[in-house]
Each structure stands twice: as structure tokens, then as C-alpha cells.
């Protein structure tokens, strides 16, 4: 059986907010997370600045792919998340903020934190006590430990345990 290639995550948790925040005005905007549709894929391309081929994630039936949008503005995708439901945890395959939400000139902060919190929320809903795993780039392990409360298991594998997951979910979602 062929093993799947693990993508090392390289998202940055810029800020844990209860929504996403405009970096220019400081205004917060409530978000919603919904399933990515085939129609959405038309704008999520490398030509439009996205780093990953989300069409591959979308076509893989073992994965669930979600988009983050601002409430009442569903046509502009702020970030994307691909997860796999394992037998005892949720695995984050891929997470990417929209091109305009990356770097020092980003438009919104809190996108990555929002998506990680959603993965934790799904884990609680599935009865997995909030456990979420992902593979991190080596240079970001300390960052994820500090910002997400994750711990490094081995070989870049990060685990978000129950207490840290609960904190993330409570930050972003009304329970």
C-alpha cells in the first residue's frame, strides 16, 4: 500500500482573535466555515497566488475541505483547511490563508487560528476530545507550541491536546 506524502505545515498564527481582524482599520469581522465547492476552485489557483493545488485536496474523497469566509461575504475566501477524520483524532492535511492574508501587508489576521480552531471543534464533535494532529516544518515547531499549545511528538508531528483545543474553540466559537 502506498503511503501518502505528508505536507509539512507552514502557516503562521499571527493572532488569536474571536473572528478575523482587518489590519488597516482594526475592525473585527465574524466568519463562517463551510464546505469548499467545485465552483470555488475556479479562483483558488496558483495563478491567483495560492501556494497549493487545492483541486487535489478537493478530489481526495478521504479528505474534507473547508473555506473560511466573512459572514455576508461568501464569495471571498479568506483561507482553506483540509482535514481527515482518523479513528481517534482529526488530522490537518493542509491549511492556507488566502494570498492577501499572508506576509507583512496581509489584509486580515486571525485566519489560520480560526481554521485550526475549527479542526479542534470537529474533533470535539466526533468525540475525540479535541485532539488534532499535523506535520510541521521544523523551524515552526516552537511557534506552534507557543501559539497553539501543541506539543511536538516526533518527526515534525504536532499534537493539539484537549486543553489547548478547548481554549482555541472557546476563542473562536460560541459554545
Image: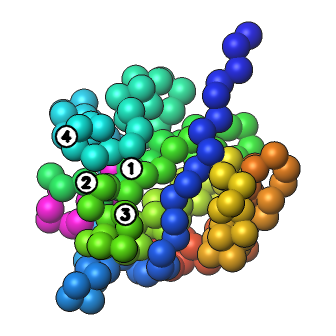
Q: Considering the numbered disc 2 on the image, is that residue within a helix, a strand or a loop? A: strand
Query: Which residue is the site of mark 4?
Result: 43
Please say if the residues under marks 2 and 1 sit with CB atoms less than 8 Å apart.
yes
Mark in front: 2 vs 4: 4
Earlier-in-chain disc, 4 versus 1: 4
Residue stretch rendered in magenta on the structure = 67-74
Q: Nearer the viewer, residue 139 or 151?
A: 139
Estimate the spatial distance between the alpha carbons at disc 3 and disc 4, rounded to whole Å: 17 Å
Identify the residue at the far right of this view.
Answer: 154
Query: Which residue is the site of mark 2?
Result: 77
Earlier-in-chain disc, 2 versus 4: 4
Residue at screen point 46% across, 37% down: 64
Query: Which residue is the site of mark 3?
Result: 102
Estimate the spatial distance between the alpha carbons at disc 2 and disc 1, rounded to whole Å: 8 Å
Q: Which mark is residue 80?
A: 1
Mark 1 crowdedness (10 Å alpha carbons): few <14, some 14-19, many ≥20: many
Residue at screen point 18% across, 55% down: 76
Mark in front: 3 vs 2: 3
Percent across and percent down for residue 86 are 67, 37
Percent across and percent down for residue 59 are 40, 23
Please say if the residues under marks 2 and 4 sit with CB atoms less than 8 Å apart.
yes
Earlier-in-chain disc, 3 versus 4: 4
Q: Nearer the viewer, residue 161 or 173?
A: 161
Mark in front: 3 vs 4: 3
Amino acid at each position: 500500500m502506498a503511503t501518502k506524502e505528508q505536507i509539512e505545515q507552514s502557516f503562521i498564527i499571527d493572532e488569536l482573535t474571536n473572528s478575523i481582524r482587518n489590519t488597516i482599520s482594526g475592525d473585527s469581522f465574524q466568519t463562517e466555515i463551510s464546505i469548499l465547492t467545485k465552483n470555488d476552485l475556479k479562483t483558488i489557483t496558483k495563478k491567483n497566488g495560492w501556494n497549493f493545488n487545492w483541486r487535489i485536496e478537493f478530489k481526495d474523497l478521504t479528505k474534507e475541505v473547508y473555506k473560511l469566509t466573512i459572514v455576508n461575504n461568501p464569495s471571498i475566501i479568506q483561507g482553506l483547511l483540509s482535514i481527515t477524520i482518523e479513528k481517534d483524532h482529526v488530522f490537518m492535511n493542509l491549511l492556507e490563508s488566502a494570498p492577501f492574508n499572508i506576509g507583512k501587508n496581509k489584509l486580515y489576521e486571525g485566519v489560520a487560528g480560526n481554521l485550526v480552531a475549527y479542526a479542534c471543534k470537529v474533533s470535539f464533535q466526533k468525540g475525540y476530545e479535541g485532539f488534532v494532529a499535523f506535520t510541521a516544518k521544523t523551524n515552526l515547531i516552537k511557534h506552534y507550541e507557543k501559539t497553539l499549545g501543541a506539543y511536538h511528538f516526533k518527526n515534525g508531528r504536532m499534537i493539539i491536546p484537549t486543553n489547548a483545543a478547548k481554549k482555541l474553540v472557546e476563542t473562536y466559537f460560541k459554545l
